[in-house]
Amino acid sequence: KTVGILISGRGSNMMALVEAGIPVGLVASDKPDAPGLGWARERGLATFALSPRGIGKAAYEAEVDAALREAGCELIALAGYMRLLSDDFVAAWRGRIVNIHPSLLPKYKGLDTHARAIAAGDAVAGCSVHVVTEELDAGALLGQAEVPILAGDTPDTLAARVLAAEHRLYPQVLKEFASR
Ligand code: GRF
């Protein structure tokens, strides 16, 4: 199935999906200056960049939806997309949007996951791929990967270890999900 990837920033998970051979119909960003967009363009991928600033969330999402459909996308993979999708958008793509989150859900939904895992004294951290629903980071889990938390870890050192696991997990889970 053709996948549309939504990013907001550097897009390293997008790169991992593309490099794993996932068929990508469109890379879209709410941040026109997202570094990942440049990488996608250099790769010859179709890109779409639009900020909701000025036009409002509903108009912005309608444009994103149209761009994804025109590009033939059947699934959406969120990859560092730092914006909440509206209930209407989620309903229109029900069961066809997945996200990668840098924690072992249901632990640490939302932001600052690595700092929170370290502060809690956890021995393991990790990442989760899940179906996107209206509720933040709460949809059905599709796969998880664990990494150890080491003595002396900072949020940055832990984030780097988790990110490497994200790049392995996301393509693997998305391939499985797309073949359902
Ligand atoms: C990743 O840690 C992802 O799990 C989280 O935001 C980060 C995005 O990184 N949602 P990238 O843009 O994929 O490099």
Image (tube, grey):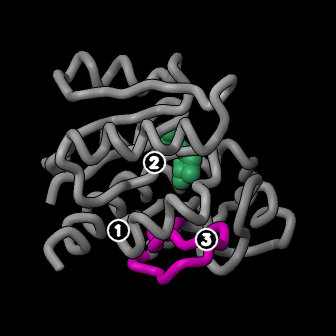
Q: Amino acid at mark 3?
A: Glu
Q: Which residue is mark 2?
A: 79
- Mark before the other along the chain sequence, 2 or 1: 2
- Mark before the other along the chain sequence, 3 or 1: 1
Judged by depth in the image, the label closer to the viewer, 2 or 3, is 3
Q: Picture quarter containing residue 57?
A: top right
Q: Which residue is mark 1?
A: 96
> What SS does tag 1 mark?
loop
Q: Amino acid at mark 1?
A: Arg
Q: Which residue is mark 3?
A: 134
Quadrant for the C terminus, please.
Answer: bottom left
Does any atom of ligand 1 lie closer than 8 Å to the CB of label 2?
A: yes
> What SS does tag 2 mark?
loop
Q: Position of residue 103 (x, y in %)?
A: 61, 66
Position of 107 relative to 76 (above/below): below
Q: Within the magenta stretch, is there residue 42?
A: no
Q: Amino acid at mark 2?
A: Ala
Characterize the local packing of mark 3: few (<14), some (14-19) or many (20 or more) Cα atoms within 10 angstroms.
some
> What SS does tag 3 mark?
loop
